[in-house]
């Protein structure tokens, strides 16, 4: 490490946890001039936030302005100023905040009401439209918006509908006073409406002449669709004389999106009945995915064309729009879209590049910083703090300091920072900085190969593609060997304890030491074994195994079509879990780019083989 700190961060953490003011004071006094001197001072202030003097906070914020700790303290201090009702100072400090939370935005409006007598809250109107509750501080803002006519009863119904669509019946009931306490919107009534055994009886007694009756019916349809989309479709047909056109279209949209995530064959047809008007971004995306799954490229073309420009310009939809144009014999229109898209290096950009030009090969290094460039970056205060924090394994704080220090750097400086992090074996921050430098960063910095002997040995032992294994590790852990997720997944390949125990039993071990999973040798060995097991159980399909590693092999198989072979890109794009869909795209992209760093020229499309129907490749899956 290039930086050292005299502060014992373990002692500091314990003093902060136990709110030991004398200990914090001693540590702060002894830290004078240290790279991390602000840390004990920060904890000393936040521990006493309810009694601290404003001038002490101001002194910290002035001295350490532009640091992540100053931003955190300012957020804490603003909440305290609101508690003290010191609205004048609130307005002064709020103006210096980098990224205000919803809570602080609403408190700022309150401050303006008190200090200035009025506040323009119109820009906060969008905070109303969410299916969940907002902080209590927003209640006066919403009252002001209703009083000014900038929110009305229709907006209240919209939010009730959003809450019901998300299954938040308790919150929908809390909103009922806004629309006159309809009895259908009580917690008890909504609970009964959501009960599959009671829904038919509830529907029979609803008063469809009232908005509450119709919204309850729509809630029942949506709830039914989650377990039986066909039954929900039958409900809409049976109620078409009682629901207006707008409500029917909304109901079709609801079941269509739910059905699309279940890969129901009629999902695209139901989107056709509901239309696209009123769909949110997620609904519009699923309308396209449903059309892809149905093989209706004309609908793909129309639905992407109907998207707002911002969404339509996302790489996925630009790529699929070009594919739909090609299917419609409009290749000349598709060519410039693919050519422009090919400039990037994400999943769809690599596909577009391959369709527009030669196979991707390892590009020459665009910029190699000299040692002085690296030293210049290493001398930046935020970088010094980050390295000092990493030295004592304060990873969360180190990541925060590093990321903050990267703001405003030139691409050349970012590459130098990536080199510095790589030299210190902080691979996740090296990748972070290199990715921000985009194409200027050498491919080897963006796609490093630490632990190469372990990865290549275990890949060889299991008959796996090393580029694929590296692609998975990069996505799972960014090469942080001792990382542990909140769920307990550990190490380079993020093995869950149950999975590790299962692998151990398969290899004749009665019990394994779970702490050993932070050892790269052990982790890569176990992870590669498990990956190979999934690959074999899923018919040797790399895409299925990648999805299975993230979401479980049973789910990966469930997402196949029953009988027909699927285009691999359609399979990936229609994975219902956003996390897994993104994961598969990134792992496969990583594998292709790692292959390029190894000098391979395998076309990307060759990695993405067609996905067979599940009935053509049935296997018993007993992995955890």
Image (spheres, helix red, strand yellow):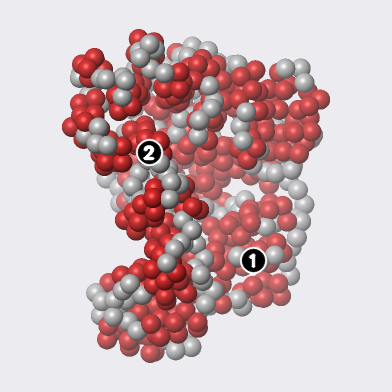
Q: In which quarter of the image is residue 43?
A: bottom left
Residue 572, numbered label: none
Label 1, residues with CA under 10 Å away: few <14, some 14-19, many ≥20: few
Residue 153, numbered label: 2
Q: In this view, does 2 lie to the left or right of 434?
A: left
Q: How many marks?
A: 2
**Is residue 268 in view from this perspective?**
no
Q: Where is residue 616 in the image (x, y as percent from the top left)?
A: 48, 13
Residue 408, numbered label: 1
Above or below, comparing residue 392 to residue 227 in the picture? below
Residue depicted at 75% across the width and 30% down the height: 355
Above or below, comparing residue 234 to residue 496 in the picture? above
Residue extending furthest toward the left: 188
Residue depicted at 56% across the width and 41% down the height: 586
Above or below, comparing residue 308 to residue 205 in the picture? below
Query: As rendered, which of 41 and 534 lies closer to the eye?
Result: 41
Query: As rendered, which of 66 and 356 lies closer to the eye?
Result: 66
**Is residue 575 in view from this perspective?**
yes
Q: Is residue 330 left or right of residue 593?
A: right
Label 2, residues with CA under 10 Å away: few <14, some 14-19, many ≥20: few
Query: As rendered, which of 144 and 219 lies closer to the eye?
Result: 144
Label located before the other in sequence (1 or 2): 2
| Element type where label 2 sits in the image | helix
Q: Is residue 565 left or right of residue 524?
A: right
Residue depicted at 55% across the width and 40% down the height: 587
Above or below, comparing residue 244 to residue 510 in the picture? above
Query: As rendered, which of 607 and 39 lies closer to the eye?
Result: 39
| Element type where label 1 sits in the image | loop
Residue depicted at 31% across the width and 74% down the height: 84
Q: In which quarter of the image is residue 231?
A: top left
């Amino acid at each position: 490490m290039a930086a050292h700190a005299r502060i014992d961060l373990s002692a500091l953490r314990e003093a902060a946890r136990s709110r030991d003011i004398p200990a914090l004071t001693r540590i702060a006094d002894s830290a004078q001039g240290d790279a991390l001197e602000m840390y004990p001072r920060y904890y000393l202030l936040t521990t006493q936030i309810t009694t601290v003097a404003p001038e002490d906070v101001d002194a910290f914020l002035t001295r350490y302005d532009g640091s992540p700790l100053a931003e955190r303290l300012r957020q804490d201090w603003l909440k305290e100023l609101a508690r003290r009702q010191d609205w004048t100072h609130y307005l002064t400090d709020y103006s210096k905040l980098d990224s205000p939370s919803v809570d602080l935005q609403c408190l700022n409006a309150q401050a303006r009401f008190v200090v200035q007598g009025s506040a323009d809250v119109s820009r906060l109107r969008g905070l109303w439209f969410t299916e969940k509750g907002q902080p209590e501080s927003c209640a006066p803002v919403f009252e002001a918006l209703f009083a000014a006519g900038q929110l009305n009863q229709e907006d209240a119904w919209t939010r009730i509908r959003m809450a019901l669509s998300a299954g938040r019946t308790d919150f929908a009931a809390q909103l009922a006073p806004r629309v006159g306490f309809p009895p259908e919107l009580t917690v008890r009534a909504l609970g009964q409406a959501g009960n599959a055994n009671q829904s038919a009886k509830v529907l029979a007694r609803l008063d469809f002449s009232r908005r509450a009756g119709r919204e309850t019916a729509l809630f029942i349809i949506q709830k039914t669709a989650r377990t039986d989309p066909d039954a929900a479709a039958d409900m809409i047909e049976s109620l078409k004389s009682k629901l207006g056109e707008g409500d029917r279209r909304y109901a079709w949209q609801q079941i269509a999106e739910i059905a699309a995530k279940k890969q129901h064959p009629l999902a695209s047809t139901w989107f056709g009945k509901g239309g696209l008007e009123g769909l949110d971004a997620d609904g519009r995306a699923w309308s396209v995915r449903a059309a892809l799954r149905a093989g209706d490229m004309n609908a793909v073309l129309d639905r992407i064309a109907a998207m707002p420009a911002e969404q339509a310009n996302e790489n996925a939809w630009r790529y699929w729009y070009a594919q739909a144009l090609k299917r419609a014999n409009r290749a000349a229109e598709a060519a410039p879209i693919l050519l422009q898209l090919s400039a990037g290096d994400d999943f769809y950009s690599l596909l577009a590049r391959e369709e527009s030009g030669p196979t991707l090969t390892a590009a020459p290094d665009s910029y190699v910083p000299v040692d002085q460039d690296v030293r210049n970056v290493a001398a930046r205060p935020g970088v010094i703090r980050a390295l000092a924090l990493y030295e004592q394994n304060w990873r969360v704080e180190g990541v925060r300091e590093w990321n903050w220090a990267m703001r405003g750097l030139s691409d050349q400086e970012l590459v130098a920072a990536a080199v510095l992090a790589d030299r210190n074996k902080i691979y996740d921050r090296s990748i972070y900085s290199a990715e921000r430098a985009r194409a200027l960063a050498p491919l080897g910095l963006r796609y490093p190969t630490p632990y190469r002997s372990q990865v290549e040995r275990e890949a060889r032992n299991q008959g796996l593609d090393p580029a694929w294994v590296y692609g998975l590790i990069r996505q799972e852990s960014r090469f942080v060997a001792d990382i542990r997720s909140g769920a307990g997944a550990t190490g380079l390949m993020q093995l869950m304890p149950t999975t590790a125990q299962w692998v151990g039993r398969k290899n004749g071990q009665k019990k394994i030491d779970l702490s050993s999973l932070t050892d790269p040798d052990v982790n890569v060995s176990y992870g590669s074994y498990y990956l190979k097991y999934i690959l074999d159980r899923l018919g040797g399909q790399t895409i299925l195994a990648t999805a299975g590693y993230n979401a479980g092999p049973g789910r990966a198989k469930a997402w196949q079509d029953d009988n027909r072979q699927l285009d691999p890109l359609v399979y990936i794009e229609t994975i219902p879990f956003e996390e897994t869909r993104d994961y598969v795209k990134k792992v496969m992209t990583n594998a292709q780019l790692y292959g390029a760093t190894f000098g391979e020229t395998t076309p990307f499309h060759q990695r993405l083989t067609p996905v067979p129907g599940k009935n053509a490749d049935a296997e018993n899956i007993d992995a955890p």
